[in-house]
Image (cartoon, grey):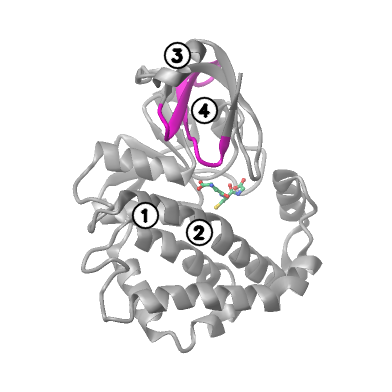
Amino acid sequence: MPDILFHQYDSSPFSEKVRVCFGIKNLAWAAVDQPVIMPKPELVALTGGYRRIPVMQIGADIYCDSQLIVRELERRFPEPTFFPQGDHGLAYANAMWSDRTVFQAAVAIIFGGLGDRVPDAFIKDRAALSGRPFDPAALQAAVPHMEEQMRAHIGLLSDQLADGRSFLTGDHAGLVDANGYFNLWFIQFAFPPAASLFENVPLVCSWMERVKAIGHGQRSAVSREDALDIARTTEPMTGAVARRDTALEGRPVTVAADDYGRDAVEGVLVGSSEHHVSIRREDPRAGQVVVHFPRIGFSVQS
Ligand SMILES: N[C@@H](CCC(=O)N[C@@H](CS)C(=O)NCC(=O)O)C(=O)O
């Protein structure tokens, strides 16, 4: 069984970002399929309450948010790199463009387009996730504006490819390709009628074909129960604590996303850097686990 257990569902765009990353490194991984809406009892047993998808599990180490998943993949499996031209900082920063601005436009186009075909249970779940009404009628009203936004974002990709390069930074695919790709994949997957967005951008379409051809590495599957067993029977890693956090070391803290899905996770701070924070927690089903979060987009409270 592969070490990488990936809590995901097939229609999840942020999962697709990481699946492309698995492909770039040709990694072996096992999908642990999670429900699209709450409840997700096995997932929250591992994370302590974080419900978003995807989550990566390696033994009893639980990595939340695609930003940190990608960073951990690069740390553990440096070759081939996600940064074929260097530029690590810019490539990680580029996730704030794809994960927030472009994603929100994609959500409006897809769910506004689907309108009353969006199931009630999904609407209620996503309203609870965001803390705001999830209103397909309002999204529908926003579609013309969001399509203009999306055309402009797609135009940026087209500009980047204008010199005939194969991938966004040159001959080899990297993180920025996965970032640029996953929202467009989401639109094509979830709402094919929006295909007109891809008219007149042949360079983007052929680049998407090349990214798709990278594949997802070597995929297998593991059940949610087996993933919990693996966590329970494995020791989590221990890490270093950043100097400025020494006063917090071994003390209880909570960590929560600052945008949506803000459920706070409680644990004892056992690791940190300017890019991540790690907390240890005990769970009746998952045993002792360490849950890792990125710094960007998350707040830590003591
Ligand atoms: N910043 C997060 C965003 C994750 C996210 O929004 N995921 C969506 C699915 S693609 C989600 O969790 N939706 C609610 C759910 O699945 O319960 C990341 O990069 O992982």
Q: Kindly report the distance in space between the C-alpha atoms of the residues bearing marks 4 and 3.
A: 26 Å
Quadrant in the rendering for residue 209: bottom left
Please determine whether, in this image, residue 104 is positioned above or below residue 128.
Answer: below
Density class for disc 1 (Cα within 10 Å; few <14, some 14-19, many ≥20) is some
Residues rendered magenta in the picture: 273-298
- At a point 48% along the width and 75% down the height, the residue shown is 154
Q: Which residue is mark 4?
A: 46
Q: Of label 3 and label 2, which has the lower sequence position?
A: 2
Residue 102 percent across, percent down from the top left: 55, 64
Density class for disc 3 (Cα within 10 Å; few <14, some 14-19, many ≥20) is some
Residue 45 percent across, percent down from the top left: 56, 26
Residue 199 can be seen in this image: yes
Q: What SS does tag 2 mark?
A: helix
Amino acid type shown at disc 4: Leu
Q: Which mark is residue 97?
A: 2
Answer yes or no: disc 2 within 8 Å of ligand 1: no
Q: Kindly report the distance in space between the C-alpha atoms of the residues bearing marks 2 and 1.
A: 10 Å
Amino acid type shown at disc 1: Ala
